Image (spheres, rainbow, N blue to C red):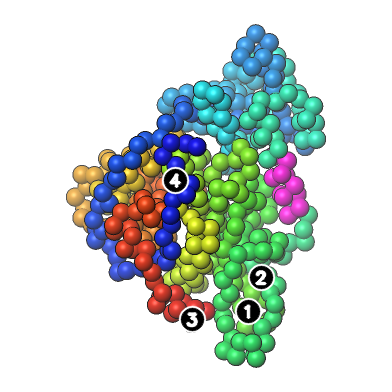
Amino acid sequence: MAPGRAPGGSCTRVSLKFYNFSVSSLPPLAPRTVMDPSIKPRMRIVCGEVRQDGRYLILQRRADGTLPLQWQFPGGRVRPGESDHEALYRSFQERLGCRPQIVGEPLLQVTHEYADYDLTLVLYRCDLGGQEYRADRVQALAWISKEEFDGYELLAADRRTAELLSMRDVTTNQLSLDSVLDPNTESALVVPIEPASDAQEPHGRQFIVKVASTREEIRALQALRFQVFYDEMHAKADPTLARLKLDMDIWDTVAEHLIVLQRLPDQKDRAMVVGTLRLVRRERLLPGLSFYTAQSFDLSPLLASFDRVVEVGRFCVARHLRGGRVILMLWNQLTDFVNTHETQALFGCGSFHGTDPQEHQAVFAELYRTRLVPEQFRPRVTVPNHVALEQFAASTEGPPAKSELPPLIRSYLRLGAQVSDAAIIDEQFNTVYVCIVLILDAERMSQQQTSLAKGWAPLKEKVRETT
């Protein structure tokens, strides 16, 4: 058991209570003295998925080097001060004599624990674009199908990567072979539901809140995410996702997805997905697969302190329903989820639109002064494309307006959530984001957090009445 972990820690019966709020209205949360967990050194490896005619490129390590004659995906270690992309360019040049085109955000990330260090492998899709390549500083090259992976002695993290790639390919291929409704219309968001009779619901509930449980619901929520993140917010989609008009990744296969359905007025057996929130519990992660947030932050301090954690992400609401009701319904359902699974902490990425941190300096200044996660739990940034919030601490712009806070971040902060000390610049999704942590473990809560978690029963009843 890791030092500082609280597997049996008691959890409050959580209700997510909201108050009239501005960031500056919350006093700083006093850090508590807890022994820092012992954390092994962490090595970050970036590799490329280079695929041609359904076959993957792998390299064999030299016989006179470390881990001799074992196979791996092309790539290498990220050196201090390098970005992932810079490390990939350098590694490909050193081993293949060419420079790849890196397509989109990471495909997936796996971890592997060695005796002396922990390894994180991040895989990107790479295209050689017809360039010539050669075997430099490697023993051999091979192009193999996913069925042939078992015949090669892959490094441990690379073997797990191969397994996850195969799983991802199955999901993507099934989706692409489906008779998908036209993704450019609202029909892509429509799913079948059990028709409700007038006797069952004389007033006719307009909305349904649930955990997605069918293939059609998963596909529809991915279509909604694509419309919001890519069509509206101008994120950059890779060719496969652009063709399918779906936002999907490996974490969708292990997540539980909260959705809000809006009944169609003229069809009793149909409804449209109008809101979604993705939840990933620690115990549902596949072996070697880490959290999505771990692509940018070292979560070791948090994960060493709490067993029952849930990552919250991919939150979005249809454009015509962003006035608050759908957000409240999702939070209502999240409350039940947290209580059912006795969750000790929630965390995830909180995004601000645009990639210029200066546009959010008033918010970042106030967050740095009042809302930092205590150091013993604080996620640590692991990528170079970030800005330290400390540099905004001297801002004289005054407290930020309520409108400067995205709805999800505003909701978290109302509950006493705290943030990382750095923000990541995400060119892929056209955002700047921080890591947000909300501690729910009663033994670790400050007095203020405990008071905020006492309940919002009247609000929950109001939400139920209107849905």
Specify whether 379 is left or right of 198. left
CA distance for labels 3 and 4: 39 Å
Distance between mark 3 and mark 1 Cα atoms: 16 Å
- Lower position in the chain sequence, tag 1 or tag 4: 4
**Alpha carbon separation for disc pair 2 and 1:** 9 Å
Q: Residue at x 45, y 78 (%)?
A: 461
Determine if the magenta segment contains residue 249.
no
- The residue at which mark 1 appears reads as 264
Residue type, label 2: Val
Number of numbered markers: 4
Q: Give the amino acid type for the residue marked by disc 3 in the picture.
A: Thr
Amino acid type for the residue under numbered disc 1: Leu
Task: Confirm or deny contact between disc 2 and disc 1 (CB under 8 A).
Answer: yes
Q: Position of residue 121 (x, y in %)?
A: 57, 32
Q: Earlier in the sequence, mark 3 or mark 1?
A: 1
Q: Nearer the viewer, mark 3 or mark 1?
A: 3
Mark 3 or mark 2: which is in front? 3
Amino acid on which disc 4 is placed:
Ala
**Label at residue 466:** 3
Name the secondary structure under disc 4.
loop
Quick one: SS at disc 1?
Answer: strand
Cα–Cα gap, marks 3 and 2: 22 Å
Mark 2 residue element:
strand
Range covered by the magenta-colored residues: 165-175
| Residue corresponding to mark 4 | 6
